[in-house]
Image (cartoon, rainbow, N blue to C red):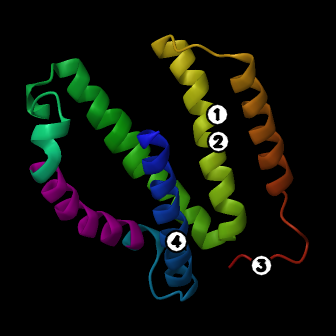
């Protein structure tokens, strides 16, 4: 249950935060890459402070003691692909489209890809319920994806 609470809090934070981000991008005073740089610069010291405060209670060991393969997965998967790549694509999408269209597409495809890759690479089970959920998500993305003829780039 605690996982659901924190997932819901993350969704609340991201939902509110991206509306602010879209407003900033819409002002045309800040571009998407600068917005990511500011977001990351503000978040990093806060995250390190939280890690220093809670890390001893929540972490199995200091991350620098992990083996090389684990550290490479952390850097490449979390840092490069999800962190830099995902955020850059998402912020560019926010600059070009509506939050109400961009956010659901990005955040709906993430679990679809997550379920599939977790099944393939981690051996996580794929139940009928998960397959049905994925199909519903894909239908939702297909319904959101087409741009209406009256939509603008910003």
Q: Which residue in the rendered view is the most extreme toward the front?
A: 1
The answer to whether residue 97 is visible is: no
The boundaries of the magenta stretch are: 35-52
Query: Is label 4 or label 1 in front?
Result: 4
Note whether 143 is above or below 151 in the view shown: above
> Is the C-beta separation of discs 3 and 2 under 8 Å?
no
Instruction: Give the structural element (helix, strand or loop) at label 4.
Output: helix
Measured in 3D between alpha carbons, the distance from the residue under mark 4 to the one under mark 2, in whole angstroms, is: 20 Å
The crowd level at tag 2 (other Cα within 10 Å; few <14, some 14-19, many 20+) is some
Q: Name the residue under label 1.
A: 112
120 shown above or below 70: above
- Label 3 sits on residue: 152
* Residue appearing at x 9%, y 50% in the figure: 52
Q: Position of residue 78 (x, y in %)?
A: 35, 39
Instruction: Please provide percent x and percent y for residue 105.
Output: 68, 52
Q: How far apart are marks 4 and 1 (CA)?
A: 23 Å
Q: On the image, numbered disc 2 is attached to which residue? A: 109
Which dot, 4 or 2, sits closer to the camera? 4
Residue that carries the numbered disc 4 in the rendered image:
16
The mark nearer the N terminus, 4 or 1, is: 4
Q: How crowded is mark 3: few (under 14 residues within 10 Å), some or many (20 or more)?
A: few
């Amino acid at each position: 249950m605690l996982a659901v609470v924190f997932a819901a809090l993350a969704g609340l934070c991201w939902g509110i935060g991206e509306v602010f981000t879209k407003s900033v991008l819409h002002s045309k005073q800040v571009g998407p890459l600068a917005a990511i740089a500011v977001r990351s610069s503000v978040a990093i010291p806060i995250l390190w402070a939280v890690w220093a405060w809670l890390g001893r209670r929540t972490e199995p060991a200091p991350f620098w003691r992990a083996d090389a393969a684990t550290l490479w997965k952390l850097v490449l998967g979390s840092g490069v692909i999800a962190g830099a790549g995902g955020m850059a694509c998402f912020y560019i999408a926010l600059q070009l489209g509506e939050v109400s269209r961009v956010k659901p597409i990005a955040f709906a495809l993430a679990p679809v890809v997550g379920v599939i890759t977790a099944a393939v690479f981690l051996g996580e089970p794929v139940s009928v319920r998960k397959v049905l959920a994925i199909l519903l998500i894909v239908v939702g993305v297909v319904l959101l994806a087409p741009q209406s003829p009256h939509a603008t780039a910003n």
